[in-house]
Amino acid sequence: MQYVIVIGIFQALLAIILLWQNKLRSNADNLLIMLMVCIAAHLSIKFVIFNFVQDQQVRQQMNTFIAYCYGPLLYLYALKRNNPSLIPASKWYVFIPVLIGFVGYTSITGVLIYAPADGYRLLHWYNEISFWTLVGSDLFFALSTLHLIRQDEHNKIKEKQLITRLAYCFLVISGLAFGFYIAGKYMGTQYVILSRSVVYSMLVYMCVLIIRHKYMTVQEVSPEKEQVLPQQAPAEMTLVAFEMQEPAADHILAVQRKHGLQEQAQQKIWADLERYLQQHKLFTDMDLSLDKLAAAMDISKYHLSETLNNHGNTTFYRYINEQRVHYAQEQIAYLHGQGISINMLSVALDSGFKAKSSFNRYFKELLGLTPTEYIRSLEQIAPPDGMLAVH
């Protein structure tokens, strides 16, 4: 079993590193990183127990509270992929079992150290309660995730496959754990050890799934994207580079560049883009890039860039910042109307800007007013119901 644990720790750490360094990492991927951190911590605790704790009852039966994190993190990942504007912290209540499990785990550990006789009795009840609640938690969140992902029409097929496979892993873990639990009751503790080995192997398999999906296949291109004409790609890639480095030259390049898409196709992409951003608020992602947006919409990034430049007469970053400013404008108007104190830094960050200075600059450029001046204009139209403070 120790070999399985060591391999699992290595795979989890490898997945964390690869996900963290991935240039296309989204905010949703941070939840996968947290899942891998939990797996690494879980297996590390077990490694310490199996190598440094001599008590056989603790080695074989003491469930780790970290396992309560797995189901909620997968469910939140599916939610975040479906709705990029979701703030995972707003679903804090899904981690209440983790907190309760932590209190129980540390309490039992303390009792075992200072009063072993009483500790063994409590350990029995702790294992019984934690086993059934862990199985129930995995089943609930796995089924909820599968239900959510089947209703989601926006995620890419491969993303759905990853989430679906991870959910089925938890279902398999729950089923096997239940089977081995029954077998252990009637046939001996060797089935408890076998059960844990299988569970740890499944955790290793989940790490491999995530690495394979997020790293090994990140460069794969769908058949629709491969239809881009070879002679168009270099010009469009040059255009994308200029979007990042010389925004002022974009219009000149767009005029000089020969259109690769018909106007009707560009109109459709533009309409899809507007609708997708309104539904998912993807512009609130501070690290949003042309690659990320095209991948989320499952279209060619070259076609998206061409549509923005030729049909929209704008660049990717300018277009996204316009969306952010309009979103911030709506938030400020809403908060002002409710008489709620407005923190401009919070509004800027929530809208997708990385700094208040860039938020102020783009706001002034697009609306002709600074955020503070905009609030004053709102006060002249309709004073707020309550006291208003601007930070």
Image: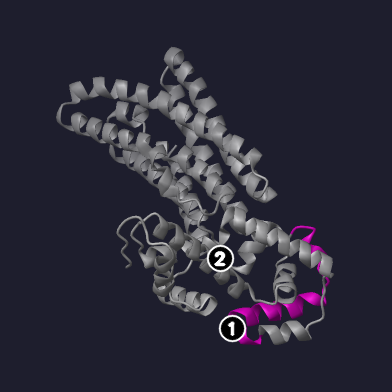
Q: Which residues are magenta?
A: 222-249
Residue 312 left/right relative to 109: right
Task: Point out the residue furthest to the front here.
Answer: 381
In this picture, residue 121 sits left or right of residue 31: left
Dominant secondary structure, magenta: helix
**Does the magenta segment cover residue 243?**
yes
Residue 325's label in the rendered image is none
Q: Residue at x 38, y 46 (%)?
A: 41
Q: Is residue 6 above or below residue 238?
A: above
Q: Quadrant of the N terminus?
A: top left
Pointer 1: residues within 10 angstroms few (<14), some, or many (20+)?
few
Q: Residue at x 45, y 57 (%)?
A: 334
**How far apart are the alpha carbons under marks 1 and 2?**
16 Å
72 sits left or right of 235 in the view: left
Q: Hey, which residue is sitting farthest left in the picture?
A: 114
User: Which image quadrant for residue 65?
Assistant: top left
Magenta span has 23? no
Kind of residue sitting beneath label 2? Leu
Question: Does residue 314 sit above or below 71 in this rendering?
Answer: below
Residue linked to disc 1:
245
The answer to whether 238 appears left or right of 145 in the picture is right
Give 266 or 41, whichever is nearer the viewer: 266
Q: Pick whichever of labels 1 and 2 is earlier in the sequence.
A: 1
Whole-percent x, y for residue 191 in the image: 46, 23
- In what element is the residue under mark 2? loop
Image spot of residue 222 (x, y percent): 75, 58
Q: Secondary structure at mark 1?
A: helix
- Dot 2: few (<14), some (14–19), or many (≥20) neighbours within 10 Å? some
